[in-house]
């Protein structure tokens, strides 16, 4: 009896839906009939179908079902259905199947979000920072420095700042531990190091050709950046910035490739050298603000500069400032920005030894030794395309 009732309800539901679809008037679409030279208003085709034949003065629009692997999700006057081109990539799963009336939708697995064409890990807020917005499959974690009276003692992509008053307990030892955790050495989370940026930007040709980015993409070893991601890079960034963004994404997607691992090792050696040069400068908050004021473009605020001084180690403070400045000014070059800023610091009675140290950093990033390293790596990566990069290999 229950099975009979269930089947009856299903059939009734189908019947109601069919009746409703039949009674809804189809929206119209203007159509010029070249044969009769008349302008007509044709019925559109419903979701799941396309226009097989437009209407005429004597016949209505003829619709046909979308073929397998194609869809139309609304009334339309298209002569073919959309292809379900979205396929789930690595670290993604299907949340909506492709049918005749809907496209396929993919989603990153738990703990990751979609960035261009890659499922990146959600950022873990460092100690001293709490989560204000948890990461989703489409957006990264949003972190914020814990306000006074609150603390965070671990790297986490889910934990909020905790109240010291609520956590501290009854003993002085607990209070001391909570305050110590709040002031512990924390990582800055620099997205691209100075050496990595110098390496990427060196690949920008002195004279850009219209097909340069496509040529570079096809020449890179490992997993290629998709055409969709490449198009987004072209739309969002200036021609000079596009190579930098392409190589940044390519390196992220090919972390386990032997060439990328070799590049990473050389960049780490460079970064260790730069860190030693910056670490002994002992930059103060005032000097960091002064450096920021002498960089071109939009400025990083003093509140953010103060946060850098509290959160970052001495070797990370200037790279973090430049990283934030580059992001704020989008298509700016951190190394050129630092060179520009150092050039103007002398007029502000900036310590001579600090200026000299910063100049050494810039010089090492633009040195002949570094250029030879870049040339060697690009020669191995790009083969016949290597002559296009700066400092031609001839």
Image (tube, helix red, strand yellow):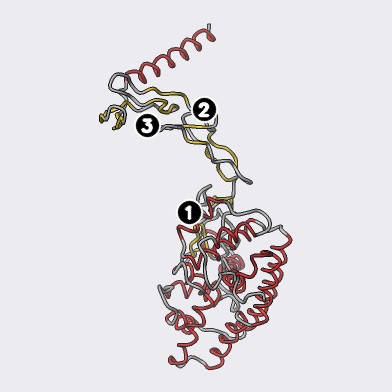
Labels 1 and 3: the sequence-earlier one: 3
Q: Nearer the viewer, mark 1 or mark 3?
A: 3
SS under mark 1:
strand
Seen from the viewer's position, the closer of residues 182 and 11 is 11
The residues tagged by marks 1 and 3 sit, at their Cα atoms, a distance apart of: 42 Å
Q: Is residue 166 depicted above or below 99 in this figure?
A: below
The residue located at (46%, 32%) in the rendering is: 81
The residue located at (44%, 73%) in the rendering is: 300
Labels 1 and 2: the sequence-earlier one: 2
SS under mark 2:
loop
Seen from the viewer's position, the closer of residues 308 and 183 is 308
Q: Is residue 163 depicted above or below 184 in this figure?
A: above
Q: Residue 288, image x and y in percent?
A: 49, 81
Residue 67: which numbered mark, if any?
2
The residue located at (65%, 59%) in the rendering is: 220
Seen from the viewer's position, the closer of residues 143 and 119 is 119
Q: Quadrant of the C terminus?
A: bottom right
Residue 77: which numbered mark, if any?
3
């Amino acid at each position: 009896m229950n099975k009979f009732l269930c089947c009856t309800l299903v059939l009734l539901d189908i019947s109601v839906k069919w009746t409703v679809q039949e009674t809804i008037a189809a929206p119209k679409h203007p159509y010029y009939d070249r044969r009769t030279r008349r302008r007509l208003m044709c019925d559109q085709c419903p979701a799941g179908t396309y226009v097989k034949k437009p209407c005429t003065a004597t016949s209505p629009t003829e619709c046909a079902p979308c073929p397998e692997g194609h869809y139309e999700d609304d009334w339309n006057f298209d002569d073919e259905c959309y292809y379900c081109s979205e396929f789930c990539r690595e670290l993604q799963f299907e949340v909506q199947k492709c049918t005749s009336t809907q496209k396929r939708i993919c989603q990153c697995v738990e703990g990751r979000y979609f960035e261009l064409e890659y499922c990146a890990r959600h950022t873990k807020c460092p100690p001293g920072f709490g989560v204000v917005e948890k990461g989703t499959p489409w957006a990264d974690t949003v972190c914020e420095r814990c306000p006074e009276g609150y603390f965070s003692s671990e790297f986490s992509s889910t934990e909020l700042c905790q109240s010291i008053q609520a956590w501290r307990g009854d003993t002085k030892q607990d209070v001391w531990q909570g305050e110590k955790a709040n002031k512990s050495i924390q990582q800055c989370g620099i997205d691209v190091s100075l050496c990595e940026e110098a390496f990427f930007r060196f690949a920008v040709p002195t004279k850009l050709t219209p097909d340069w980015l496509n040529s570079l993409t096809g020449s890179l070893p490992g997993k290629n950046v998709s055409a969709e991601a490449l198009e987004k890079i072209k739309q969002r960034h200036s021609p000079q910035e596009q190579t930098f963004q392409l190589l940044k994404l390519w390196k992220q997607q090919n972390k386990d490739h032997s060439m990328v691992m070799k590049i990473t090792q050389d960049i780490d050696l460079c970064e260790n050298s730069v860190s030693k040069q910056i670490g002994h400068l002992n930059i103060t908050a005032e000097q960091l603000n002064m450096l920021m004021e002498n960089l071109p473009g939009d400025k990083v605020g003093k509140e953010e500069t103060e946060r850098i001084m509290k959160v970052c180690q001495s070797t990370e403070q200037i790279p973090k400032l430049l990283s934030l400045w580059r992001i704020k000014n989008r298509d700016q070059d951190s190394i050129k920005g630092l060179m520009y800023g150092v050039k103007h610091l002398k007029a502000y009675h900036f310590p001579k030894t600090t200026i000299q140290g910063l100049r050494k950093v810039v010089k090492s990033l633009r040195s002949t030794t570094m250029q030879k390293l870049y040339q060697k790596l690009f020669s191995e990566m790009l083969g016949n395309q290597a002559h296009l990069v700066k400092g031609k290999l001839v």
